[in-house]
Image: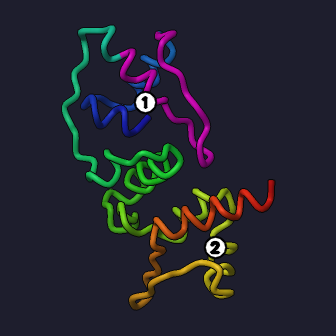
Amino acid sequence: MPEMARLLGVPRSTVYGLLNQSEILKTIEFDGRRRVTKKSFYEWYGSQNDYHIVSDEMPETVKDEDNRRIEAYRRAVLERDGHSKNIGNDVYLTVNEAAVLAGVNPATVHKWIKKEKVEAVQSSKTIRIPRQEFEGWLQGREKVEV
């Protein structure tokens, strides 16, 4: 809801009012928060003339993300922190993003890194996981488990 309010330049209370009035806007529960689905937002947006997008300040790594789970996670982090410092990019994932992608706890990703099952690059306190290798490793792991 906060993201929709920021995009439209309206208070959150207006967004909640729109949700109650519209049959088009659909919500999902993600990470303990209610989110308006992107598809329903754009369907609703195209069907009305009263509201206009006034802010498009999402970083390219969030806007162009092709994995829905990571996109939703990055948007939530951006909403929470107000900056994109704590999100990865197209080439590297954060530990939390890898956990979201794998559907596990971040502690599990740390264990995988420690056991050298997953490659990681560490700079100071920041750990980044090469995305392509991680996704390939995950796919191979899912095939073995099935």
Which disc is residue 112 wearing?
none
In the picture, measured across the screen, residue 107 lies left or right of residue 90, that is right
Q: Would residue 41 be found to the left or right of residue 96 on screen?
A: left
Q: Secondary structure at mark 2?
A: helix
Inspect the magenta stretch and tell me whether residue 145 lies in it.
no
| Residue 38 badge | 1
Which quarter of the image is occupied by the N terminus? top left
Residue at 60% from the left image edge and 63% from the top image edge: 99
User: Which of pointers 2 and 1 lies earlier in the amino acid sequence?
Assistant: 1
Query: Outermost residue, bottom direction?
Result: 124
Q: Which residues are magenta?
A: 22-44
Determine which residue is flagged by label 2.
109
Specify how the rendered protein is coloured: rainbow
Name the one closer to the observer, 103 or 117.
Answer: 117
Q: Secondary structure at mark 1?
A: helix
Residue count near mark 1 (Cα–Cα under 10 Å), binned few <14, some 14–19, many ≥20: some
Q: Residue at x 32, y 46 (%)?
A: 64
Residue 44: percent from left, percent from top? 38, 15
Amino acid type indicated by mark 2: Val
**Where is residue 122, by image quadrant?**
bottom left
- Residue sitting at x 29%, y 28%: 10
Q: How far from the left and from the top, in percent, is residue 92?
A: 41, 69
Q: Could you say which quadrant of the image residue 89 lies in? A: bottom left
| Residue type at tag 1 | Lys
Would residue 25 be counted in the magenta stretch? yes
Residue 90 in the image, given as x and y percentages of width and height: 36, 60
Where residue 66 sits in the image (x, y, percent)?
42, 45
Tell me: residue 58, above or below residue 113: above
